[in-house]
Amino acid sequence: MEMTIGQFAKLVGSTVRTLRYYDKIELLTPNKLNKSGRKVYTRLDWELFQQIIILKHFGLSLNEIKEQMANQQFKNQEFLQVQKQLIEKKQAELNDKLEVITRMERLYNIEGISEEELDDFAFIMLDLFRREKSQIQIWEEHFADDKEIMKQINLLRDPVYKEKMDRETWYLIQAIRNAIHDNDSTSRKKVQAILNEMNNLFPASKNFLNLVDDERFLAKYNHEFTNYFPENIANYIYKELKAYYGENDNNE
């Protein structure tokens, strides 16, 4: 089997340009010459090309493929295990991103909410969803010795529960925007009513609020909790939560 570069490109379903690039970077370099002194591809080159295609299929870069083929960095079984782990990690990341999109789509389908209204705060919600998984892991570590709080944290992984909290969070942000704009008792009562509903869903929220004033916690995890919030909304949420729990403590 001896083929010119054009013939070989047709055989393997590639292009002359690609094969010349592989030759240039010494990934697939034909060693045999024809009578005219031109390089020709042999069966060995075909076998090497198949290896390149397989390794590309598993996501390796051309440099990684070159390294693997030249030095056999991993034996076949080791290579498959490494690639399996990488694919599982990518798959988990894609599933997380898909969940974020799905949760956002649900908000857009809530009756009575216009697309324009939600667009104003879409990035706030997307950032909350994006960070949630790592934040839950931190909370589990921090509250590991408190069984009651751990039960509530476990709820945060439940899809039905998430949907309820997502909806209430959106209502809260919307109500706070109105309260900042109107600055009256009616809008503030609306905020308080939503906070009350959220507290019924997640009583541990008071414990989470206390972490905002925990200097040791913030020194360790602040980078994981710098959520995307406009400053006026963030300050209002903090003030209203403090007021809400302060009033409830006094009532108790």
Image (cartoon, helix red, strand yellow):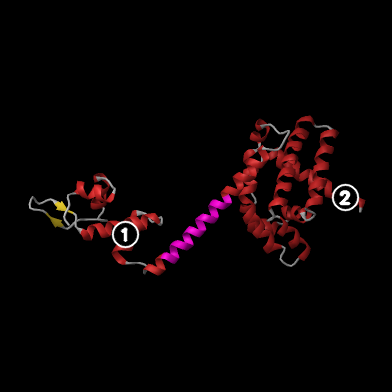
Residue 79 in view, yes or no: yes
Q: Position of residue 7 (x, y in %)?
A: 20, 48
The stretch of residues the image draws in magenta is: 80-96
Q: Position of residue 20 (x, y in %)?
A: 23, 48
Left or right, 132 with reference to 27? right
| Foreground pick, 57 / 249 | 57
* Location of the N terminus (image quadrant): bottom left
Q: Amino acid at mark 2?
A: Asn
| Foreground pick, 92 / 144 | 92
Q: Quadrant of residue 167?
A: top right
Labels 1 and 2: the sequence-earlier one: 1
Q: Position of residue 178 (x, y in %)?
A: 76, 33
The residue pinned by badge 1 equals 51
Q: Amino acid at mark 1?
A: Gln
Residue 227 in view, yes or no: no
Relative to 76, does residue 3 appear above or below in the rendering?
above
Left or right, 84 with reference to 147? left
Left or right, 126 with reference to 252? left
Element under label 2?
helix
